[in-house]
Amino acid sequence: MPAPIPATGTARVHILQDGYVREDDDGEHVGSTVTLIVDGDIVVVVDPGMVTSRAALLGALASHDVAPQAVTDVVFSHHHPDHTVNAALFPAARIHDHWAVYDGDLWISRDAEGAELSPSIRLIATPGHTEQDISTVASTPVGVFVCTHAWWGADGPADDPFSPDPQALARSRRRILDVASVIIPGHGPSFVPGPGTPR
């Protein structure tokens, strides 16, 4: 059984891009929420997926005094391209998904559940949007931030149109809500969960 998630810790969380999904005249535009988490020497980028501008994404990273080569770890919440396509911007990073860590040509199999990237950053299994979804949990001085695709945005949607297992999604949402002070969803700004948050 993984250790309990600390209610506070030393991680610092910065949103590099708020995600979105919108329909414009030229088609559907999709951007993942991209998050930077720093804890000591560990520098994590979560879901470096589709963005309007790679230069703007790297500019947002630089605004926190982080160079792309300094990113130690990249986490994929799941393998949809809108959350993964810009991983190569971080050439020195290990990449984490639900069943392995990839470091250069080294494939290290492991279950993401309870994996610790640092004393204040860990991964948990949260299937629902896909069967392989994981969430990144960061314990900070002001509470617990969870990067997750259990919600697309603050309003859910209550029923994820892509979920292969709505009951698994509901269980994952309950698990996240038990610990999260702030939720960073897959395609929207961060939010503080409350009674209206879809379960």
Image (spheres, rainbow, N blue to C red):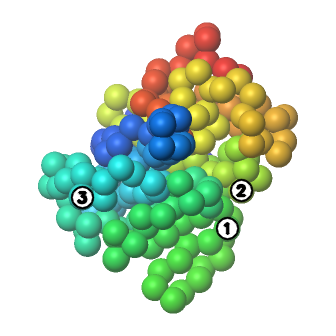
Q: Assign a secondary structure to mark 2.
A: loop
Q: Residue beneath label 1, please?
A: 99
Q: CA distance from mark 1 to mark 2?
A: 8 Å
In the image, which disc is placed on residue 164?
none
Residue type at tag 1? Trp
Q: Residue beneath label 3, please?
A: 55
In the rendered image, the vertical position of residue 31 relative to residue 65, given as above or below: above
**Quadrant where the C terminus is found in the figure:** top right
Of residues 117 and 130, the one nearer the viewer is 130
In the picture, measured across the screen, residue 195 lies left or right of residue 37, that is right
Of labels 2 and 3, the one closer to you: 3
Instruction: Assess whether mark 2 and mark 1 are in contact (beta carbons under 8 angstroms).
Output: yes
- What residue is at 47 percent from the left and 21 percent from the top? 192
**Which callout, 1 or 3, points at the residue further toward the start of the chain?**
3
Q: CA distance from mark 1 to mark 3?
A: 31 Å
Q: Residues within 10 Å of mark 2 (few under 14, many from 20)?
A: some
